[in-house]
Image (cartoon, helix red, strand yellow):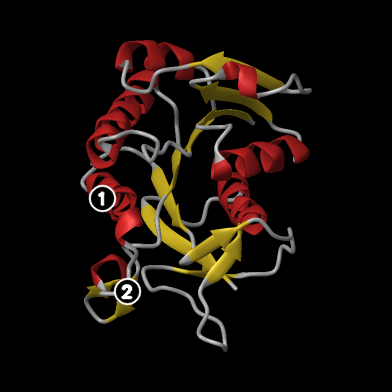
Amino acid sequence: MNIALIGASGFIGSALRQEALSRGHQVTALVTQPQKLAAQARLQVVKADVTDTAALTAQLKGHDAVLSAFSGHAQADTLGYYLRGFQSIVAAVKAAGVPRLLVVGGAGSLEVAAGVQLLDTPQFPEAYKPTAEGARQALGLLRQEASLDWTLLSPSALIAPGERTGQFRLGTDQLLTNAQGESRISVEDYAVAMLDELEKPAHSRRRFTVGY
């Protein structure tokens, strides 16, 4: 497939980039700092500003799918910047006529009990709240889309570098935990789950989650 990957040099975006390339896909890496990425077979690196909807639309045209690992955590107004950027991405995907949008979501909007989301629990770290709230609102915006074919993948509560095992569980709106009560996934296995969904769609117009 010909994939446009927004945020391809970030923490999760880098794992998605490598997983997509390892599967033989053509990847257009849309990043703010192209110099961060070295030349690689089947990889085209393009400087992009997600808040420039018209320019982004032109860059997305002709792709089979868009993977968005966009994040606003480096900005002073994390929540505001993320939402502006995310709305621009959705508008550009639709205007460019790209068939699918797959989005890196957050764990904060997953339920830990009936009607209780992780983000709303007392133990949720204050530093991560703006990013988590942005991801939660992004999911709400996607659920209001009438025609866009979207999928959002929420990680477990802890996503960190680790192994690519290919062995994990999938869920829907509830936080996944293991027998020890831990909620975790390696960034490598998160990328596997996302690319599996891209290649064999099973969660069209839905959110799902991945964990051990």
Which residue is found at the position 28% from the left and 49% from the top?
130
Label 1 near label 2: C-beta < 8 Å?
no
Q: Secondary structure at mark 2?
A: loop
Q: Earlier in the sequence, mark 2 or mark 1?
A: 2
What residue is shown with label 1?
Answer: 143
Q: Which mark is residue 18?
A: none
What residue is shown with label 2?
Answer: 123
Which residue is found at the position 31% from the left and 30% from the top?
85
Residue 117 shown left or right of residue 30 in the figure: left
> Where is residue 136 shown, x and y percent of the image?
28, 54
Q: Nearer the viewer, residue 124 or 198?
A: 124
> Where is residue 142 shown, x and y percent of the image?
28, 45
Q: Which of the 4 image quadrants contains residue 82?
A: top left
> Where is residue 21 shown, x and y percent of the image?
72, 35
Q: Which of the 4 image quadrants contains residue 163?
A: bottom right
Rate crowding at label 1 as few (under 14), some (14 to 19) or many (20 or more) other CA atoms within 10 Å: some
- Inspect the image, locate mark 2, and give the three-letter code of the amino acid beneath it: Gln
- Inspect the image, locate mark 1, and give the three-letter code of the amino acid beneath it: Arg
Residue 95 shown left or right of residue 7 in the figure: left
